[in-house]
Structure formats: C-alpha cells, structure tokens
Image (tube, rainbow, N blue to C red):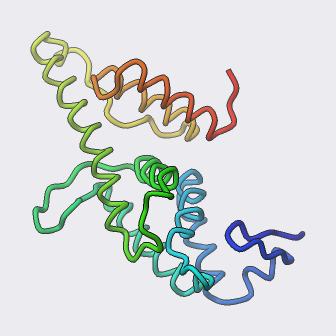
Amino acid sequence: MRATCPDCGAQAHLSAFFVEDDGKRLAALLAEMQPELGRAVIAYLGLFKPPKNALRLSRAVKLVQELAALVATGDVCKDERTGVRRPATPTTWAIGIETMLAQRAALSLPLESHGYLRAVVYGLADKADAAAERQREESARAGRHLTSPVATTPAPGNSPYENHMRWIKQTEDAGGFTAAEAEEERRKTRERYGVTE
C-alpha cells in the first residue's frame, strides 16, 4: 500500500514512513490520542516545518510528546507565571489546533513552541468555562441546581462529531455563542466530519 506525505508530497510504501525508530515512536504517540486530536496534530506539525527543509522526525516526536503532556493534564494554562488554569478536553485542543490552521497565513512560521496554541486553547476554555459559570449562576438563582446538574463536558462513549455538536449546544445554551455563532460552528463541524444533514 502506497502513502503520500501531506506536507512534502513524497510517495512511498506505507512501511517506508515507519522504517526509522522515530517514525515508529511518532505513530505510537498519535495512535494513543483521540482520533480527532491525532488528525489535527498531524496537520499542526506542518506549522513547525522549516521553510527550506523537512521537519525532522526526532523534532516531530518531541513536539508530539510535549503536546500529549499538555493535553494529559486535563487543563490549560496560558501563562505559567500566573498559574490560572481552565479545564481543557482533547476536543478543545483539537479545536484550538484547527483554529490555528485556519489562520495559518497570519501566523509567524515556523512555530518554535506550543505557546500560541496554549493561548488559543486557553481562550476557548476560558469562554466555555465562563459560559458554564453563567449557566450555573442562572440555575442557582432559579433553583434548578437542586434538581439537575449542568453538564460541562460531553458524555463519554459518543463519536467526536456528536461530542463536538453537544459542546456547541451547551456553549450556546450557556450564552457563550450567539445563535449565529453556534450555527456557524455547527456548519464547520459538519464540514470537518463530512456529515450532511
């Protein structure tokens, strides 16, 4: 089976991409991630590619290891000096990466670290956290907190598409998105996952 590198266009038998130990390590790291995050990370690595050279596999492995460690904490901190953290799921990280990829032309490439991604993910997480807090306050004022909890993260066991659509609805319900913003997010999500409705 032949494969094509999405970054440089090189074509080879699939096994050729995993001849080096670093290639095997990279594949193993990506396989451990949620599929939507793994796909986003592959494209994200292209943002680190030097202008006239290929991204070294050892560098790609290091970048993915660093990113996996950030995701594994379950939260995000924009600036370690302040220590302010917000909950961040792997889906939030995937959305942050896709946001950066959509703004690729405006970025100063190649990237040197995950600092800009952390800022983007922090912004997404902060917005969702603020919306959830507003919803909790409204529920408390209305007395609804006594009967039903507010869901702040997607229920496990569903597809990434369903999880993301649920997150959009929760964010809209909590006031984090206007109706128009929510509909635009839904359109992008359907496009991303190839869903037609």
Q: Which of the 4 image quadrants contains residue 40?
A: bottom right
How far across and how far down the image is residue 146, in percent? 16, 16
Q: Residue at x 29, y 28 (%)?
A: 176
Q: Quadrant of the N terminus?
A: bottom right
Q: Residue furthest right?
A: 1
How far across and how far down the image is residue 166, in percent? 46, 28
16 lies above or below 2: below
Q: Residue at x 67, y 20 (%)?
A: 197
Q: Residue at x 42, y 53 (%)?
A: 93
92 lies above or below 127: below
Left or right side of 174 for 28 = right
How far across and how far down the image is residue 149, in percent? 26, 24
Q: Which of the 4 image quadrants contains residue 190?
A: top right
25 lies above or below 171: below
Name the residue nearer the viewer: 176 or 68: 176
Q: Residue at x 48, y 23 (%)?
A: 183
How far across and how far down the image is residue 195, in percent? 68, 31
The mark tally for this picture is 0
Name the residue nearer the viewer: 127 or 116: 116
